[in-house]
Image (cartoon, rainbow, N blue to C red):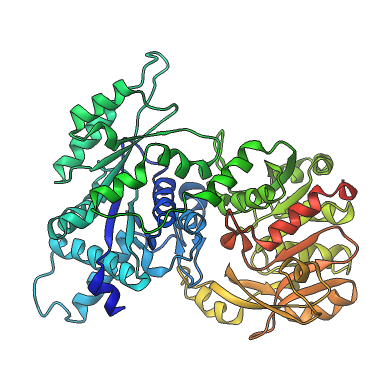
């Protein structure tokens, strides 16, 4: 560690947004990271959320998107999931910060007299805390590059302190820091021309914060032409070659390749006086992109959830890791993933519609909270079990699979979850240590979070999926986010009726994976396998789920 610090200080790349949010800053950061990694550098990425929330755990997934969970139990923004998928590396707690988390740290330090009695001020003390966290993340990971994504847009009031941190860092290490602006160039239908004025305005706003962008990633529906590049160059005070075209594309995994067409990686290295350590040319990534472009045979997957409707719009961000995990596994088998959003409430209102599940190659019931849509999900699971449709349950999906089995196979009529009702037969019950937390209304960051061990039994689908051999039990580690567990008091009767406990946490004897016999694929996990799936390394359970869905005999 000391030698690394002596010979090489990390380079910092801030990425901010202009005009509007939601246009791909996270994918831009992930892609830049992948490019720099392909050139032989060690890269880590940080997400800054401007919310007062201490973490993402208490945010509504419909409003904010998926809550991603890291190995060390951090509940964070979904962009951290993209960082992990593109970099193929784990991201940890220190790589995520919110306004609330930063203020909490500063206030705690002030209470502990760590400021030696000085007056603590918003500026410079809050930006200094931000800078301290950024540098600490770089040291911990021994990274050559630390990429920092500032959520939202440059014109928002809540981003001012993070922009101030970037300005102060540039002042102290001007040769080691770049600022990249991701800005949208609209093409109004009534005009029929790509407009640069919003980007010009965004740059001027950034200038007012004391920052001049070094590069602009120009997001738009189509590639930029030279006229637009020249215009942005003149009015935004950067060279035309530093305006990088970032058009809409079919797959996010093509973004690093598109960026490299415009020489983005070498441009960054040149500005920071660096040369590539290796030349791997994104070979594996290009192969993946080629597969994605050429796949034609579809695999149809239905996801029965509740966090994707907002008014007349369907949002997919609530389940983004599930979606990407399905894609990774589908590409592995050279299949084109076709994902269908199926509302659980539809099957409650019109039970006859459940027969439509037969037209899908597989059904997923993902995680969630509360009782809305529970009945529809239970009917979905029953239909998949009885009609031999490949089924994958995740977290709540596993709990409901157990309840459905208890009701309809074990004939425990009152089988239910303590989370959604006060019932006499709590097949799924709250974990003992969670009861006091719930009584005290301590909800934030208090669930069973992060990586825990799971011992998988031989002669199970899960055992084969994870590559188990020689009939010896297999120990794996997977990520969790839940308060409720399968009640061990019911394990004996469930097992007698044919439910297989394929995976169990050895430290606390908690059921992690269930399966049923004589079914092409009926597997459900208490953990979230989607969080560990990568484009070039699909998760074993998703891979085997898709394999089952594409077998002719399972049609």
Residue 18, position in %: x, y?
30, 38
Residue 524 image-quadrant placement: bottom right
Query: Which is nearer the eye, 77 or 264?
Result: 264
Measured along the vertical axis of the image, is residue 459 above or below residue 171? below
Residue 91 visible (yes or no)? yes
Asked whether, in this view, residue 346 is left or right of residue 215, the answer is right
Q: Quadrant of the N terminus?
A: bottom left
Q: Horizontal and vertical percent for residue 367?
A: 63, 59
The C terminus: image quadrant: top right
Rendered position, 404 above or below 472: above
Vertical arrangement, residue 109 with respect to residue 328, above or below: below
Q: Quick check: can you spot residue 415?
A: no
Q: Which residue is most to the bottom?
A: 507
Where residue 117 appears, as percent x and y from the top left, is 9, 78
Q: Nearer the viewer, residue 417 or 35?
A: 35
Q: Is residue 38 left or right of residue 139?
A: right
Is residue 324 rendered to the left or right of residue 222? right
Identify the residue at horizontal 74%, vertical 52% (top origin): 546
**Residue 232 position within the rendered picture, expressed as x and y whole percent measured from the top left:** 25, 28
Q: How many marks?
A: 0
Depth order, front residue of 302/194? 194
């Amino acid at each position: 560690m000391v030698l690394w610090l002596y010979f090489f200080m990390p380079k910092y790349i801030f990425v901010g947004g202009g005009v509007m949010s939601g246009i791909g800053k996270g994918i831009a950061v992930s892609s830049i990271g992948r490019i720099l990694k392909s050139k032989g550098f060690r890269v880590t990425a940080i997400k800054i959320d401007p919310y007062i929330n201490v973490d993402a755990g208490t945010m509504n997934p419909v409003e904010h998107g998926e809550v991603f969970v890291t190995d060390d139990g951090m509940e964070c923004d979904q962009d951290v999931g993209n960082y992990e998928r593109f970099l193929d590396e784990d991201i940890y707690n220190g790589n995520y910060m919110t306004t609330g988390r930063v203020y909490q740290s500063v206030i705690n330090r002030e209470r502990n007299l760590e400021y030696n009695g000085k007056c603590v001020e918003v500026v410079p003390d809050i930006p200094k805390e931000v800078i301290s966290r950024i540098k600490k993340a770089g040291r911990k990971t021994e990274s050559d590059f630390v990429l920092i994504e500032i959520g939202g847009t440059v014109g928002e009031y809540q981003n001012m302190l993070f922009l101030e941190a970037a300005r102060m860092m540039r002042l102290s290490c001007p040769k080691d820091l770049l600022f990249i602006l991701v800005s949208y160039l609209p093409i109004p239908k009534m005009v029929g021309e790509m407009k640069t004025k919003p980007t010009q305005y965004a740059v001027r706003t950034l200038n007012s914060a004391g920052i001049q962008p070094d590069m602009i990633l120009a997001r738009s529906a189509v590639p930029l032409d030279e006229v637009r590049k020249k215009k942005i160059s003149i009015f935004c005070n950067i060279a035309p070659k530093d305006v990088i075209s970032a058009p809409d594309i079919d797959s996010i995994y093509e973004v690093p390749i598109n960026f490299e067409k415009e020489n983005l990686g070498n441009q960054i290295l040149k500005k920071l006086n660096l040369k590539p350590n290796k030349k791997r040319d994104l070979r594996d990534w290009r192969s993946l992109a080629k597969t994605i472009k050429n796949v034609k045979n579809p695999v149809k997957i239905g996801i029965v959830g509740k966090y994707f409707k907002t008014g007349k719009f369907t949002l997919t961000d609530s389940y983004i890791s599930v979606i990407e995990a399905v894609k990774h596994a589908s590409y592995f088998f050279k299949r084109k993933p076709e994902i269908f959003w199926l509302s659980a409430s539809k099957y409650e209102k019109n039970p006859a519609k459940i027969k439509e599940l037969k037209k899908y190659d597989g059904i997923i019931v993902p995680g969630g909270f509360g009782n809305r849509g529970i009945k529809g999900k239970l009917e979905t699971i029953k239909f998949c079990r009885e009609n031999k449709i490949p089924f994958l349950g995740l977290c709540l999906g596993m709990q409901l699979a157990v309840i459905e089995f208890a009701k309809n196979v074990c004939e425990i009529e009152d089988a239910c979850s303590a989370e959604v009702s006060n019932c006499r037969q709590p097949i799924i019950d709250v974990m003992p240590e969670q009861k006091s937390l719930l009584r005290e209304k301590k909800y934030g960051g208090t669930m069973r979070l992060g990586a825990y061990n799971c011992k998988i039994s031989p002669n199970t689908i899960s055992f084969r999926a994870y590559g188990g051999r020689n009939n010896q039990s297999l120990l794996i580690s997977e990520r969790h986010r839940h308060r409720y567990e399968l009640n061990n008091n019911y394990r004996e009767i469930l097992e007698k009726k044919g439910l297989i406990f394929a995976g169990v946490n050895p430290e606390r004897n908690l059921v992690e994976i269930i399966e049923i016999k004589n079914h092409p694929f009926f597997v459900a996990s208490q953990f979230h396998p989607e969080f560990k799936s990568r484009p070039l390394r699909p998760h074993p359970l998703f891979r085997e789920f898709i394999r089952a869905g594409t077998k002719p005999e399972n049609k």
